[in-house]
Each structure stands twice: as C-alpha cells, then as structure tokens.
Amino acid sequence: MELAGARPGPPFTVTLDGDEIDALPGQTVAAVLWSAGITSWRGTRGSGAPRGVFCGIGVCFDCLVVVNDRPNQRACLVPVTPGDAIRTQEGTGHDELG
Amino acid sequence: MSKRLTCDVVVVGAGMVGAACALYLARAGLVTLVLDRGPVAGGTTGAGEGNLLVSDKEPGPELDLALLSGRLWHDLAAEPGIGGAVEFEAKGGIVVASDAEGMAALTGFAAGQRAAGVEAQVVDADRLTDLEPHLAPGLAGGVRYPQDCQVMPSLAAAQVVRAARRAGAELRTGSAVTDILRAPDGSVRGVRTTGYGDVHAPVVVNAAGTWGGEVAALAGVHLPVLPRRGFVLVTEPLPPGTVRHKVYAADYVADVASGDAGLQSSAVVESTAAGPVLIGASRERVGFDRTFSLPVVRRLAAQATALFPFLGTVHAMRAYLGFRPYLPDHLPAIGADPRVPGLYHACGHEGAGIGLAVGTGHLIAQSLTGGPPDLDLTPFRPDRFTGAGEER
Ligand SMILES: Cc1cc2nc3c(=O)[nH]c(=O)nc-3n(C[C@H](O)[C@H](O)[C@H](O)COP(=O)(O)OP(=O)(O)OC[C@H]3O[C@@H](n4cnc5c(N)ncnc54)[C@H](O)[C@@H]3O)c2cc1C
Ligand code: FES
C-alpha cells in the first residue's frame, strides 16, 4: 500500500455548542465531529430523533447543523474554518419564524 | 400474459387526470383499466405543485370547472383515509397588489369572480399582516380567496388510483400504448400496448397530459397539446405557520392567461405539510428542454422575496421543472371526440390539472353513462382546433 503522505496544515479549534474541539484544515464539519467521537448533532422535526451523517456526499440532508448562526448547513459538505461556532440543531432551526 | 384483456374503458395515463377518470368511471360501474408507460404520477403530475385554485381564474368555463372540482375535492377529502393522505388543506389564497392601480384592477377582477360564484374578500393593507405575519410591508392590499386549497399531487394521484382500484378499476404501469385499434367503421375497439398486447375496449380515454397530442394522433386526430415549462424552487423546511395561505402577486393572473411563448413568472408562495416552502412557477414555451435555467429561478426567488422578505435568509434546497400540457386557448379537451366514436379526451389542463382533474373525471364518467353532464362541455370540445394559426 502506498501512503498518500498527507501533510495537513497546522490544527486549529472550532466549537460545538461552546466546547472547543480540534480541527484540521480541509476537514468538513462532519469529519471534525466524527474525529471528536460525535456522531449525532441534530434532532428531527417530527420526533426529535438523533441524526448525523447518512450519505456523506450532500444528497440526503440528514447531517444538518448550525454553523455560525446559519441553520441547515450540510455538515458533510461545509469545510471548517478556525473559530467556527457549530451548534446542534433542533427542528427546522428557524424558531425565529413560525 | 396469455389471457386476452377486455374491459369497458381503457384510460391512457396514470397522472392526476387519469386517476380521477378511473375513479369516477369505476364508481359509475364501468370495468376500467388504467395504463401508463411509466409509474403513477411519473408525468407532469409528479413535477408540479398542488394548488387547487379558483383565485386565478376569470369567469368562464375554466372557472366553472374549478368550482365543480373544488366541491368534488372537498367530498373526496372527507372520505375515510383520503384527506390526510393527500395532504389536503383548505388554506385559502391571498392575492396581493403592490400599488393602488394594481389593487383597483384586482378588486375589479374579484368582483367579476364573485358574480360567478367565487368567495373573494377584499383585505385592506393594514390587515394583511394579520393573515400573513411575514408579508412585506407597504403592499396596497389584497383579496382573500377562502376556496383555494392544496394537495400533494403525487400522493393525490396515488391515493385516487387506490380508491379507483377499491371501486374495481385495474392499474397496469410500465406499459405504453402504441396504437389505438379501430373497427372498419372507424370506431375504437381497443389499444395496442407494449406490455399486454392488444387490450379490447369500446372506449379509450386519452389522459396522457402533455403527450395527449401523440395519443390523439394514434387515432388519427389532431389535438395540439404543447409543453409549457415551469420551474419550482424548494426551500429548506420552515416552521408551520411561517406562510399560511397560498400567496401571490396580482400579476400572476395575467401570466397564466398569456399566450406569449417568452418567459412569464410571478411567484406563488405556499408552505407544504413536510415543511419546505414552494416558490412557483415560471411559464415558458421552450419545447421539452430540461436544461436548468438560473435566470428563471433567480427571478422566481427575487419575486418571492419581494413578497416575503424573510425568504432572502433561508436556503433554496433545490429546484425542479415540469411541462404543463398546454392547449392554444388555455382550456382542456374534455369529452367525446366526434371524429372517432369511442375516443374521449381528458387532457390539456395546463397549470391547473391537479385541481381540475376531479371535475374532469366526473364529467367524463357522466358523458359515458349517458347522464346530462353537470357542465356544458361545448367549450372543451376536443375537435375545436382546426390546425391553422392556432399555436400562439
Ligand atoms: C411547475 C408546474 C407547476 C404546476 N402547478 C400546478 C398547481 O399548482 N395546480 C394544478 O392544478 N396544476 C399544476 N400544474 C399542472 C399539473 O401538474 C398538470 O396539469 C397535471 O399534472 C396534468 O395531469 P395529467 O394527468 O393530465 O398529466 P400527467 O401527469 O403528465 O400524466 C399523463 C400520463 O400519461 C402517460 N402517457 C403518455 N403517453 C402515454 C402512452 N402512449 N402510453 C401510456 N402512457 C402514456 C405518461 O407517462 C403520464 O404518466 C403545474 C405544472 C407544472 C409543470
Ligand atoms: S450526510 Fe447526506 S447530506 Fe450530509
């Protein structure tokens, strides 16, 4: 096997519901959360059932999460940047409407 | 399949219109077979929206059909298991005007509709946000149409097919009709299919939607159904109550009635039971071109955010498109074709086929069982097109 020999840039931190977690440049939100052992970060609109990554490629919209106050971001697609404030999402994430 | 298929009526097409025809035919006691080359709701029914509108229709035959259909939808929705399953909502519509001139035109239009049996209530500018809290400020007023309703079209077609089957109809999908068989005297004696050979029946109902012209041609008759493309934008799910009615700007009515091939759009905004808000729909005559058009959906988005500024802060998850079955005078073809005994048409409902389907099915069943139809079918005559200078 030939190793890719990836040399990621210097790590940085982001927060999940205020708690710091480590991240590497180029990682998606989902990759960061998984690396930290977190597999669910959303409750469904109906029953509040836990959700995380399902398809991993941006198709299923299961992995929705709040990033820097914008709800319904697909964690499997959005790359992290230093200091991102990630929050778990309940329901539509749009309680301000309704 | 060795057993030869025989029935009273073959319905070609399992979209909303074919489903409704099958339901009322089966309930009238006719042995009915529905055939579709694809799945149920695989045509335009699965590619549009489910507004059941009276608000956008001027007095005339289409409005009469919409009012009849509205009553039948209410009856259907009240049957056990149907209303909830098709997401029927009698939510009402609100048409808004942006300036005094538009408001005057709108109230004039509404007065004419009221005389034709439509419930239409003028809403003053300062009361609009009582009805729709997130509506843009500064509108000149609106008209509320309590009879406007909504269903989820694919579910509606599927549930109505199911009800038709409970009433004895048979459904066969994945089998195209490739010919309409005729007796020596020219009358219909069945259809040729790719999946089940020849099916014998003295009556064929053409419910092939945008492809209704092709099916008519199989019987040698001219019916100029054309595709009119529409895009719909779908937002991320939003909390219930964010958008309460079907809301659109008064210019929409002019777009619907336009014969222009160029792009028309004015956003109709409605929420769905699943949460996403639908923003539809554009109207263009560009054949069966499925190419995504950013300018079109951008314009829809801009018009929708002009009505509901908060939409500017929510995501559009996706857009989809469909091809409305369009006849040159904007009326469907409904009833017997005098040129071919046994051939009936139920197609060409353009942007209103979900709503008008039930009235259409009911009228087709009435004309086949010999009773006097609830509406005069003359304006819907399928042989009204001569082929000359009509494709405007
Ligand atoms: C963007 C958009 C928005 C819309 N919004 C609304 C709305 O809000 N309210 C409303 O009432 N209407 C709306 N419409 C219009 C509505 O969708 C159509 O009028 C309606 O779906 C037509 O139904 P139908 O059953 O006639 O046609 P279809 O659903 O297209 O069904 C025809 C069927 O015939 C089948 N078929 C064709 N040829 C053959 C053959 N040779 N053999 C076997 N089967 C065949 C096809 O496979 C298809 O399933 C909208 C349409 C669009 C595109
Ligand atoms: S996991 Fe499917 S869209 Fe992200």
Image (cartoon, coloured by chain):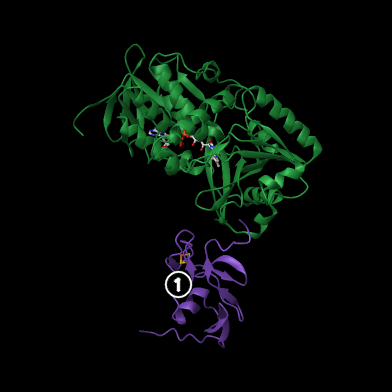
The letter of the purple chain is A
Name chain B's colour.
green
The picture quadrant where one finds residue B139 is: top right
The picture quadrant where one finds residue B283 is: top right
Residue B159 lies, in percent from the top left, at 39, 39
Subunit under mark 1: A
Instruction: For residue B222, say whether it is visible.
Output: no
Q: As shown in the figure, which amino acid type bears the numbered disc 1?
A: Ser
Instruction: For residue B391, say whether it is visible.
Output: yes
| A20 on left or right of B164 | right
Point out the image quarter for the C terminus of chain B: top right
| B28 on left or right of A57 | left
Outermost left residue: B2
Residue B269 lies, in percent from the top left, at 62, 46
Judging depth in this view, the residue of A65 and A59 nearest the camera is: A65
Q: On screen, B215 above or below B293? A: above
Q: On screen, B222 above or below B236? A: above
Which residue is tagged 1? A40
